[in-house]
Image (cartoon, rainbow, N blue to C red):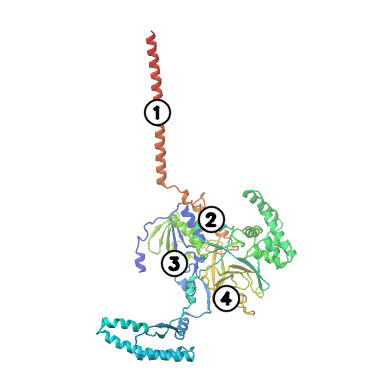
Amino acid sequence: MEEERKNNTSWLENDKFDCVILGTGLVESLVAGALARAGKQVLHFDKKVIYGGFDSSFNLGQLTTMLQESNTNALLDKKDLVPPYFENVVINKFVQSPQDENKNIKENETKTTTSTTTTTTTTNKEEEKKEEEGKKEVETTTPTEENNNNNDNNDNNNNNNNNNNNNNNNNNNNGNNKNENEILNNNEPEVLQVIDVPLVQDKSFEELGRLFSIDISPTLLYGRGALVKLLISSSASRYLEFKSLDQNYLFTNGKVHEIPSTKGSIFKDSTFSLKEKRLIMKFMESIRELKKEGSDLDEAKKEEHFKQSIAELEKQYKRFIDYIKSFKFTELVESFILYGLSLIHEDLESIPLETGIESVFLYTSSLLVYGASPFLVPYYGVGDIPQAFCRLCAVFGGSYVLSRTVDSIQFNKESGKVESIICSEGQTIQTTHLITSPKYLPTISSNINLIQPQKTIIKTYSRFIGIIESKIIGTQNDSFITIPPKSINGKNKNVINILQLSSICVPYNKNKALVHFTTLSESTAENDLKECVEQILNNKKDGTSPTLLWGAYFNYSVDFVESIYQENDNNIIVCSDSPNGQTIDYEYQISQAKKIFESICPNQIFLEKVPDADDIIHFEETETTTTTTETTIENTETKKEKETEKETEKEKEKEIEKEIGKENKE
């Protein structure tokens, strides 16, 4: 079968594309949508059968299968180590398997019976057996009811015998006995028969699993973040639905505390003292002043003022954490600002001043935009985001092929640049650019070395995904919890983020919640997160903690690429396959996608807005309008010519009359 595919040289009708993209991660999907919108012919491959790479979403069955099959060594042997794949997988299941559930259902079916009224015409032996079963199973009758039932059963036996005799007589006298049978049937007492009817069972956990939408790399979107603005400006938002997060929390002193979202909620909050509240408000006002928020200045002047202010501050503070410490906050307030407002959860000690201030301002400016919380959550999972840009690419002529990949690359002997690729179907496709992520490079054969880009940073994350009954104590349905370092018995070295979803991405009205734990890896996911999971979910001191139904620990590694080009400049562009970053604003991924787009389409707009249907003027309409305008111009010109001709004729007539008058006088 594989050989037949390899020999299929006419698999695609078109064998010439401006750009071939391998992998459907977020950056690749952004570039694909932008290139197609700019008029380029795009062919987009993915070796997997789903969109998104590490940004994809799965139901419970799909995720379980993928986790079970993620043997890194086996994938390396198959050259199939392309995203998404996982390491150090541990799956914990705390509910019964379908086989056990079926056994229990069968036992319940044999034990539970209901009484239904039916008319029977069975033999006396069958009636006696059913009477005995009824006596055994119907145990709630009184002694008088039992006597009445016995009398009724005796009468029924007699009536059945009479019915048999009447049926024999009916063969001889059909017409006369017909009315007698109707009378007998009407007077005939009904027989109680006990039959087995299974009770209506709720769907099993495995059946409910199809209704979950579980992200590999869950994240949030700021209401005024770069990605939300891009979705709106490019019209890709029409393919998505979002929900505002209910509340975000900070975990301190063994409890979750709400992060206040407005000035009023800060002063109503009981976590901070009055002095601490004033310090928080003073800090937030200083950030607003740096950005000139609320002033009458235009955006260019606001940005200029911000750059000048940052330049002055950087003379004193190089790092964001130094600027925070200059306010002399208490430990609680400092933790609230660093981990609750800035949401910078990686390399906090080395974050530049400008990046930190921008992050805090993004949080405060996103408040009350789409809800009380500054965050939005995709209604059906993060996997819809790259898929939205893939749809945009397809609308503008892009071609998509899943479960296929690039086998080899052919280079021009003179220029050394990409000339064509050979896909897994064996067809040669001409192209001038190939865009992919670092994890795909080892799977492609070539006559030159495809080296990894310089300054490629590999980060490994530890993840726990759990399905719980009810939700985490003290939280709202859809919430985000930040756990600062050293908060779990002083052992967690890095920040741990928890995203809880119980109104979206889960079965409707089934009292289930989906919880995502994420942190930078120090060891295996189980070692990094198990103690945190137990403290948050399995603390049963008060008896109100949620019940864990299913859980899985795993690690995955992603690549951050700073230089997108190969050293030999061969038109192979390598992008990051990372869905994560220091912050959650997607600025890193979008800026890299813009950089790739500008290298192929210089001086063109990145993801130009798609016009509305009412604003589109089709070619036929323009042609008719031009013809009508031409005819109207011609008509007006002919009218003017006729008018001028009439005027000249009148003038000639006047001159003739004058000449005739002169002749008469003479």
Q: Alpha-carbon distance for marks 4 and 2?
A: 39 Å
Residue position marked by numbered label 1 in the rendering: 641
Question: Pointers 4 and 1 in contact (CB under 8 A)?
Answer: no
Q: Position of residue 264 (x, y in %)?
A: 69, 61
Disc 4, SS: helix
Disc 1, SS: helix
Question: Pointers 4 and 3 in contact (CB under 8 A)?
Answer: no
Q: Residues within 10 Å of mark 2 (few under 14, many from 20)?
A: few
Disc 2, SS: helix
Q: Pick out the residue farthest to the right.
A: 275
Residue type at mark 4 is Glu
Question: Pointers 1 and 2 in contact (CB under 8 A)?
Answer: no
Residue at position x 29%, y 81% in the image: 178
Residue type at mark 2 is Ile
Residue position marked by numbered label 4 in the rendering: 526
Residue type at mark 3 is Val
